[in-house]
Amino acid sequence: MKASLKACDVVIFGGGGDLAMRKLLPALYHLDMDGLLAPTTRIIGASRRDMSAKDYQDKVRAALDEFVPASKEDTTIWSRFKERLSYVSVNAQEESDFARFNEHGVGDDERDVVFYLATSPDLFGSICSSLAKFKLNQARMRVVLEKPLGRDLASSHAINNEVLQNFQESQIFRIDHYLGKETVQNLLAIRFGNTLFEPLWSSAHIDNVQITVSETVGVEGRWGYYNKAGALRDMVQNHLVQLLCLVAMEPPSRMDSTSVRDEKIKVLKALRPIEGANAYTKTVRGQYAKGMIDGKDVKGFFDEEDSNPESRTETFVALRADVDNWRWAGVPFYLRTGKRLGQRYSEIVIQFKALPHSIFNDESNRELQRNQLVIRLQPEEKISLTVMNKVPGASEGMNLQPVDLNLSLTEAFNDKRSPEAYERLLLDVMRDDATLFMHYGEVEAAWKWVDGIMAAWAQTSERPKEYASGSWGPAASMALPIKDGRNWHDY
């Protein structure tokens, strides 16, 4: 990663919370370790709790010990990083508290300022209004918004409008950490940096696209929050739809934020609505029951603390999306995500069409003769391309079998540490590069599409289908591509 070393103040609202300690501060530490922070860049935690700067430094030190074990061994970097850390006690709902940022010199010396809102979205509007009151919304100042940006189109519109009253769109960075993953960015490199794939990237050569984000964890003590969200809002509306956009978008005129965002918005507007009766044939939702994962018995959704057996909130969703444009006409995009599934992984599968005619022996295995591009996002980051190869030997005729050509980012760049997604995204905010962030128009277009699905679900008395923990979701989700004469990649 290359960066300008311009000095910057990074202010983290919710600076003592889980996201800050588990992801944001370790990411900033790694940037410092890689020499990507200017010597005078400051990191300022902000929350309601009364805490001294030393108390905050100690809390950050403990978090780094847990999440960046190597930091224990490098006292030089910690010493430098510690000097960057300070703390401001601020109640986000008390406007007068924001004067303390001026007292701490935030934004002095014409330096850029990044305000990272790692708080409830309900506070985004009041925080931005208070920042503006104390002139902390100047052009060189930016605000980062964590998901979820609302529960539907109306609430998302309200949150965005509150923020836009005090900051320009160019100052607002709506973050989706999936877009900071190396393999997601490599998707752009594969498509637009190689002559091999782009000529084949259309309905003429691609049969279907599959995007899977599978989790083995359950709601993990967050039943109240998750019951209000569900898999469609929590994962599909942002993560999976963003990945779909990167797969389906047209080549941008240049690699900048405006060009990339414009092409993604075109994809979102081309998504065929899933409404009314279509929702019954194009979507499957489920709730996990008791089961076994990694040899251990695990709870069902309604065995979790504070659960309500009347809940119809989905912990799993699978759906078929269609992009109605010339490039993708007739190509199904199968999306699925769920909790308590058999394996933790995220991947994009580009399934190319079968040969129109096989000249080789085994016609019964003609289905094997399909090229497949698999982009694995987690837990390991790798890209593989399945090609057909002759089976070694001198038997009569020529028999083929699929062979994977693998690119492991870890092995290919073994002298480089693969950065966490938040490292790249935080650096981009400091550089004022919004390419990997969501535009207001993207968020609203995605919510409009998802709202149609939620409205259709709300009109039915049918409950989400039960699936055993450790399985791959309800049986109906397996049948979703089968109805089209296809299968999920792992079957």
Image (cartoon, grey):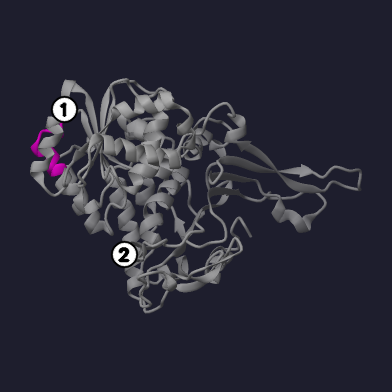
Residue at left offset 21%, top offset 46%: 49
Residue in the foreground of this view, choosing between 10 and 64: 64
Amino acid type, label 2? Lys
Name which quarter of the figure residue 142 lies in: top left
Amino acid type, label 1? Gly
Q: Secondary structure at mark 2?
A: helix
Could you tell whether 262 is left or right of 280 in the image? left
Give the residue number, with chain letter if any, for mark 1: 105
- 77 in relation to 446, above or below: above
Q: Can see residue 432? A: no
What label does residue 346 carry, if any? Answer: none
- 405 in relation to 111, above or below: below
Could you tell whether 429 is left or right of 318 in the image? left
Please report the bounds of the magenta region as a residue range. Answer: 128-138
Measuring from the top left, give residue 17's x and y in whole percent: 31, 47
Residue in the foreground of this view, choosing between 256 and 465: 465
Measuring from the top left, give residue 96's x and y in whole percent: 8, 42
Residues under numbered marks 2 and 1 in contact, where contact means CB atoms less than 8 Å apart: no
Sort mark 1 into few (<14), some (14-19) or many (20+) by Cα contacts within 10 Å.
few
What label does residue 228 carry, if any? Answer: 2
